[in-house]
Image (spheres, rainbow, N blue to C red):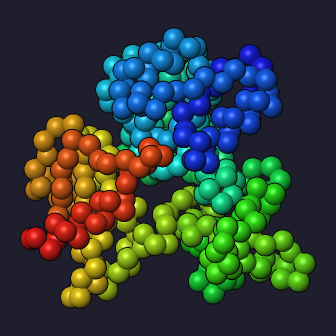
Amino acid sequence: MVADDVVSSHAPLHFDLSTFDLYAAARAGATLVLVPPKLSVFPVEVAKFIDTHQITVWYSVPSILTMMVEHANLQPGALPSIRNLLFAGEVFPTKYLSRLMKLMPHALFANLYGPTETNVCTAYTVPEPPPEDGPTISIGKAIGNVDTFVIDDEGEVVAPGTVGELLVRGPTVMRGYWGDIERTRQRLVTDPRDPDFGDPVYRTGDLVEEMPDGNYRFLGRRDHQIKHRGYRIELGDIETAINAHPDVVECAVVAVPDEFVSNRIKAFVAVKAEIADSEMINHCAELIQKYMIPETFYFREHLPKTSRGKIDRQLLGREAIELAAAE
């Protein structure tokens, strides 16, 4: 970022994404433009806002960008003022990322990753539009002055290529949760590589795999792993399959506890055209195992969002339980 940049400030101040907007812009002496909160629900207006203010650096959650791809009537070469387009906070469905990159070949796209407790700790510059039916893109490598590594269920550091939990060490890591000593002890732990003198490290709760090029592949939350009929399932894999359908805008898969099969899998799906249950089942069957296919699909025009612009999974989880009880 340089002094000539015009930076969007889209995230609410209680969302850690806002720290980049405020402090990075101030450090560079760049211009900061506040995005009106109500604007983000109107994709056409977001695109107009970017053009009007000649935004050069845009940073937001992917759901805003997905809605722009779907509803802002963008044409090739759209939003020419943007040179850096940054996104974080949730997984960007590959098909929408690919389409947006093809519409904006002039812009550099980067996926920033990091929980609030560490802020951004890894980053990945997307080199080219990925295949629309491809896997989700990497979350990249550790940023400068930050150290990341992966451990298994026993707390042992694993070799590249092995799935495990991502841990973070460095100056961006929090010092603890205010007034919650027990939670702090659970998340800020001794560095297993240097138990005597190492700084505390933060357990993200995110499952990753280090690929041959050193970048991490994000596989989902530990608490998004469920057991269903004896199988261990990652809900993010199901969401990736559903999002690959051309008429799906976004989705959220939730698990409803069940005494017979451990968990029942339900999917809330925002669509731009009507999809029959049978069509979605057949679509999923081509991409994931049969036991992973949700038993119920709830099709909606849109999914509820939190104040941070993310899908409100807690609300959908409660709704799924209520719907399951009614069924």
Whether residue 167 can be seen here? no
Residue at point 25%, 51% (across, down): 269
Tally of marks: 0
x and y percentages locating residue 5 in the rendered image: 70, 20
Outermost right residue: 197
Q: Is residue 26 above or below residue 278?
A: above
Q: Quadrant of residue 225?
A: bottom left
| 219 to the left or right of 184 | left
**Depth check: 204 or 236 in front?**
204
| 46 to the left or right of 59 | left
**Depth check: 234 or 127 in front?**
234
Residue at point 74%, 70% (across, down): 201
Q: Quadrant of the C terminus?
A: bottom left
| 112 to the left or right of 249 | right
Q: Quadrant of the N terminus?
A: top right
Residue at point 44%, 46% (across, down): 307
Q: Is residue 297 above or below residue 30?
A: below
Q: Quadrant of residue 274?
A: top left
